[in-house]
Image: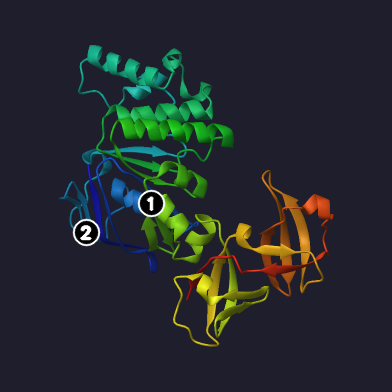
Amino acid sequence: MSIQLKDISHRFGHHRVLSDISLDLEAGEILCIIGASGSGKSTLLRIIAGLEPLQQGALFFDGQPMAGPDHCPPPELRPVGLVFQDHALFPHLTVAENVGFGLDHLDSGTRSQEVAQQLASVGLSELAQRYPHTLSGGQQQRIALIRALATKPGIMLLDEPFASVDTPLRRQLREDARGRLRSSATTTIMVTHDPEEAMAMADKILVLSDGVAVQMGTPYELWRNPTHPFVAETIAGLQTIQGVIQGDQVVTDFGELPWQNLRNPPAKIDGQKIALGLRSSEIGVSYDQGQCSIEDVRFDGQHWSGLIREGDAKLRVNLPSAPEQNLVAGTPVNLSFTNAKATAYN
């Protein structure tokens, strides 16, 4: 089932939390919505679900009007499945009863068979007669997902479904969830604050900033060509520093970057200030007497990195030979941007 959002805006009192959000999602695609706290992610999901009234704009499922300012059916009248961070399992029902809750239209034998198949699909058949409070967080998450999928919704809406699960298990759960959603061809919209999770789950990512859709595309498109500082820092792993255009260079606190190294270059106006997104791995480091100094040295499991300070500005760079060079706080360094490709923001 495809989804179309047309110019959706929303206010809480005088505060505008969403501004003219439009998107098209094809049947079977998985969309992750990411943004800072308060960016409008969960509000947008709740509007699609029917948990918030649609104040402005229009919502379409398979090209047919589903909701608008004058017509807003509740969740039970929409072809959607819902899974939230707290899983919302019924505590007084067994696991089997929870999974079968939305299958009252089936006769008892067919319903029991469907419940058994759903539990077997996630390897939890032995938990059928247990109650939710006796399950681990990961088990509860799996039960919540198959309960929603059991009704065969055209659309699945997930709001931070893995947030309460420990990191190693979270990776396994999202792999399992993506596999289940893809195999059932269920169109999915998931809200997350975790960029790694969005990259792992999504066919497309929508990035919200202060209620505005600042970029949407595949994970690779956002990683390769971010067009907004939030996307650059969270999805692409870039750092943002400030610079000033001077001729064929952009002058920063840490050195000069050649103009030809810029992606999305603005108009070349001397004296114009711009923001630059840079990858740590592309910044050259030399350990002679430089204008900058190392403030801190850290190892992240893959490489050594140094936090470089120049005045009030800071920049993190890779230090491939930190132990051998005995690099410590206060070591002077020079940085080179000759091989660095930078994304420019006006």
Task: Using the image as rendered, state which of residue 304 and residue 60 is in the foreground.
Answer: 304
Q: Secondary structure at mark 1?
A: loop
Pointer 1 local density, CA inside 10 Å: few below 14, some 14–19, many at least 20: some
**256 to 58, vertically: above or below:** below
Q: Is residue 79 left or right of residue 210?
A: left
Quarter occupied by residue 83: top left
Task: Using the image as rendered, state which of residue 172 and residue 274 is in the foreground.
Answer: 274
Q: Is residue 261 visible?
A: yes
Quarter occupied by residue 316: bottom right
**97 to 179, vertically: above or below:** above
Q: Position of residue 58 (x, y in %)?
A: 22, 57
Q: Position of residue 38 (x, y in %)?
A: 47, 58
The amino acid beneath tag 2 is: Pro
Is the C-beta separation of discs 1 and 2 under 8 Å? no
The amino acid beneath tag 1 is: Thr
Instruction: Tell me what residue is drawn at x 49 percent, y 86 percent.
Output: 269
Q: Is residue 192 left or right of residue 72?
A: right
Q: Position of residue 291 (x, y in %)?
A: 77, 74
Residue annotated with mark 1: 218
Q: Secondary structure at mark 2?
A: loop
The N terminus sits in image quarter: top left
Instruction: Tell me what residue is drawn at x 29 percent, y 49 percent.
Output: 48
Instruction: Tell me what residue is drawn at x 21 percent, y 40 percent.
Output: 77
Task: Using the image as rendered, state which of residue 8 and residue 70 is in the foreground.
Answer: 8
Task: Using the image as rendered, state which of residue 217 and residue 250 is in the foreground.
Answer: 250
Residue annotated with mark 2: 69
| Marks 1, 2: nearer the viewer | 1
Q: Residue furthest left?
A: 64
Quarter occupied by residue 241: bottom right
Q: Is residue 226 left or right of residue 244?
A: left
Q: Earlier in the sequence, mark 1 or mark 2?
A: 2
